[in-house]
Image (tube, rainbow, N blue to C red):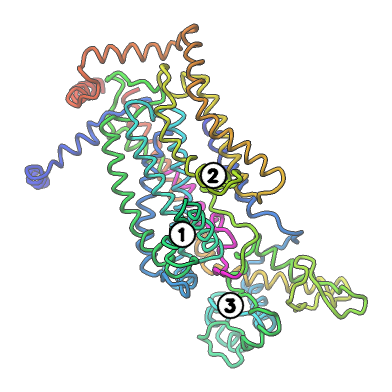
Amino acid sequence: MIKKVFSWVDERFPLDEMIKHELTEYPVPRNLNYMWSFGFLAMFVLVVQLLSGIFLAMHYKADVGMAFDSIQHIMRDVNYGWLIRYLHSTGASAFFALIFIHIGRTLYYGSYRRPRELLWWTGLVLLLLLMATAFMGYLLPWGQMSFWGAQVITALFGVTPFIGEEVVIWLRGDFVVGDATLTRFFALHYLFPFIICAAVAIHLVALHWVKSSNPSGITLHAKDNIPFHPYFTIKDLFGLGVFMIIFCGFVFFAPEFWIMPENNVPADPMVTPPHIVPEWYFLPFYAILRSIPDPLGGVVAMAMSILIFLAMPWLDRSNVPGGAKFRPGYRIMIYVWFLDLMLLGYLGAQAPEGIYILLGRIATFIYFGLFLMLPFISRREERRSRVQGLPREAERLIREEQEELLRSEHYLRRENDQKELKDIRKRLEDES
Amino acid sequence: MRKLLVLLSAVAMLAGVQSAMAGAGGALKMVDIDNSDQARQRGAEIVVSTCMMCHSLKYIKFSDLSQIGMTEEQIKYLLEDQDIDDRMMSLTPIEVRKESYGKVPPDLALMAIARKKGPQHIYTLLTDYYYKDAEEEETDNHLFPGIKMPDAMAYADAESDEERAEIEAQAADVTSFLVWAADPSAESRRTIGAYVIVYLIILTTLLYFLKRRIWGKIH
């Protein structure tokens, strides 16, 4: 019976082929570590956010007079409303934490390098969409920090040359953040996740075309690739279990950890909070914004702090393959950069006075300086590896890759991958 | 193992940033939150008889007090002109309160989560009053200098250590009640949470062994 149904479907829709192509015969390097699970985890949290968001929208009122109260209505009167709301508020932080690790992994292992430039760029578009969605969502509870955060960030667009004032009014729909702003942010906060879903689909198509990178950064010999299912489905599921323990720990035992106390006070346009601080995931970029004395320069620097990632494939033109694993210079650079990012995050939470201003400027300088030094770092590194030679492991992997290239016209050719995968599967079956 | 350490230190730093944001503030006194119904009920009585002269708790209905174990009679005993299904609103007219304090006193329903270290903040504020002049006419507050709120618990008037200890105990009860009021679902959340975490740990352990078994084939 089931067989009949499937064959009926297969005649009309390539279900069987899709399952084979994307799961049971999709080749994945066998040496991936758990750092490669974070993309899947981020996708899982996207689904959590979508579902919890839809249920929240059923009870939320996007009106300046009712928004704050409707959150408390969800927390107190709606059945398990507290669970839905805390899943959503904790989920936002979890999403950023996972995405930051996902991006950090891409940088560390050099996964943005040829032929994965488009994969990298679609990922960065996703980051920008995520930031916009989170920013608009943060206004909805209509607490003090929601209001003043939106007030400050929308005001930043006032630095646009010539039409700054008009742009700010156009964004807010009013001269100040008010009812018009709240309703449009709600509408867009509901719309953007669907754009994100579409962008995720593109990201995945690009991934399944170029295949996953791996810790060595060198394309592996076909015999070192294994099918996604069951090997990586179970690995990712175990990773999901570990993530869920941490995530649910926060949701059930410390949900207010991610909510600033100021945001449990209703928005009041007449009272400015002493420190207007964005959510933790915006802090490094906020610190960069504040460390440039000129307002326009600050906004440009903040935008550049993310857009500069787009240039990574051009900045990093090293002839040494892969990421930090076989490249000592790049490894030091990326660790310094990670530390600098955390320092910026810390500084973003401090009031901009005294030593913090100076530290912020130094950290901003290091942040951009490291990117721009990358071509020089690579050159030095290459000179060194020409003298000393690459590590034996890298040499072996490169030799195997070249042998493979000789045998197949192009290592991305699907037919080849699949034929070889079939061989592997057969060999595995024989062995077991 | 090294990766785990890196990950843990990253989480620790994050937590550090968050707590640095939450920290600061004046010298807060430590307070033990008594989660028993008795403490909350004592707190509720003080809140209704004293705090609600000026403050409201608009997200709580009087009938909700049954959740902290009060019987209908006990609740009705607290009521003046209100109905048991009414929200806990101050009976003093808004204009009067605005005139006395310059603004409407803040709602107390969320107070325990609306300030940094909310419970400690509430407790400290209530027990930080002192007379700023020798004639004992005007009070002020160490935590919140220049506060408009009068010394509702009469802490500055206390003459002996016993009296002070008694007021401190009352302030702790008020804090216990307000902690409950800010998040009435906290207890069921933690109960469900314990089951969820235990379930997830068992599931994840099973997944781990399944993973080892499946990967065992190719090692």
Query: Mark 2 and 3 residues: CB-CB less than 8 Å, in contact?
Result: no
Q: Amino acid at mark 2?
A: Gly
Can you see residue A273? yes
Tell me the element at label 1: helix
Q: Amino acid at mark 1?
A: Val
Q: Mark 2 or 1 closer to N-term?
A: 1
For mark 3, name the chain.
B
**Left or right of A5: which side holds A36?**
right
**Left or right of A416: which side holds B155?**
right
Considering only vertical position in the picture, is A128 above or below A323? below
* Nearer mark to the viewer, of 1 and 3: 1
Query: Mark 2 and 1 residues: CB-CB less than 8 Å, in contact?
Result: no
Q: Tell me where residue B102 appears, x and y as whole percent.
A: 68, 79
Q: Which residue is mark 1?
A: A168
Q: Nearest the camera: A99 or A270? A: A270
Q: Which residue is mark 3?
A: B57
Residues at marks 2 and 3 on the same chain: no
Q: Tell me where residue A374 appears, x and y as whole percent.
A: 49, 25
